[in-house]
Image: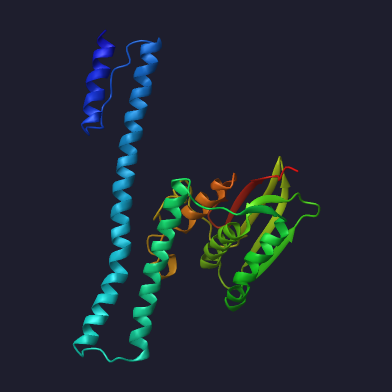
Amino acid sequence: TRTLRELTTATQKVARGDLEQQVPVRSRDELGELAVSFNQMSSDLVKSRDLRRQMTADIAHELRTPLTVVLGHTEALSEGQLPPDPETFDIIYDETKRLNRLVDDLRTLSLSDAGELHLNQEQISSGELLDHAAAARKQEARGNEIQLQIEAAEDLPEVNVDADRMTQVLVNLLDNALRYTPAGGQISLSARSAAGGVELVVKDSGPGIPEEDLQHLFERFYRGDKSRQREEGGSGLGLAITKSLVESQGGQIIVESKPGEGAKFIIRLPEQNT
């Protein structure tokens, strides 16, 4: 009964909030399997706790920067240290918009995590999804002297997705590609047939992603380029939201990249059954 006593003691400690509990695995029978499962559960709880703490700290950090700017400028305005001119109000407005985007992003992730994100799924062609996303960023690409290409294979099956949410996914990926693709480069949006469904691909000719960053790319608030300014890098939630939205619609997203060879994001969507 030693294993049972150890499990009982460890379970009681976990119930009191002491999550870092591991019990010895003394056999390969059912009790041994139970001990292994308990150890895995305990490790997962610790990881979840640490991620929650880190995310709370990250959210506080992200909120603090624009709030500091807004408070500082409004205080300076009230004391007459700054002139009430358009430039001052533009700064306050831009920081307020950033706060609003961050709150919207956090709400989207929260709803998706809870399985409460409303999706209006319908049958739609892959080419139409690509066209909508490209139209949203065509002007920006042209202004940055980047060639934006669209290529959809013929006779592709329709997919069952929320068109607005999937367009948001593709636009997020386009924003990421535009951020890193230099002038004179190109970004391609393509759709192709895959086993049991369709693949949507966003590929850029940027500098690529270091191998050590690939496994963290979809984590919340993760920025591979530590030198990137927040004004350029967004909230750090774009790719996390992208992954969450794709998976909530039965899809999968992966990234392939090598330094110097650009990045390729692949969205795999199941075929619409008729």
Please state the horizontal and vertical placement of residue 241, each as a whole percent of the image.
48, 54
Q: Quadrant of the N terminus?
A: top left
Q: Against 105, is 70 above or below? A: below
Q: Nearer the viewer, residue 144 or 183?
A: 144
Name the residue: 63% across, 72% down: 138
180 sits to left or right of 59: right
Name the residue: 66% across, 62% down: 188
241 sits to left or right of 131: left
Name the residue: 58% across, 47% down: 249
Name the residue: 43% across, 69% down: 232
Q: Nearer the viewer, residue 265 or 122?
A: 122
Q: Does the image show residue 224? A: no
Please state the horizontal and vertical placement of residue 64, each as a whole percent of the image.
28, 66
The structure's colour scheme is rainbow
Q: Nearer the viewer, residue 196 or 211?
A: 196
Q: Does the image show residue 127? A: yes
Q: Splitting the image into 4 quarters, where does residue 13 fall?
A: top left
Please state the horizontal and vertical placement of residue 109, each as a whole percent of the image.
44, 53
20 sits to left or right of 167: left
Q: Splitting the image into 4 quarters, where does residue 48 fall?
A: top left
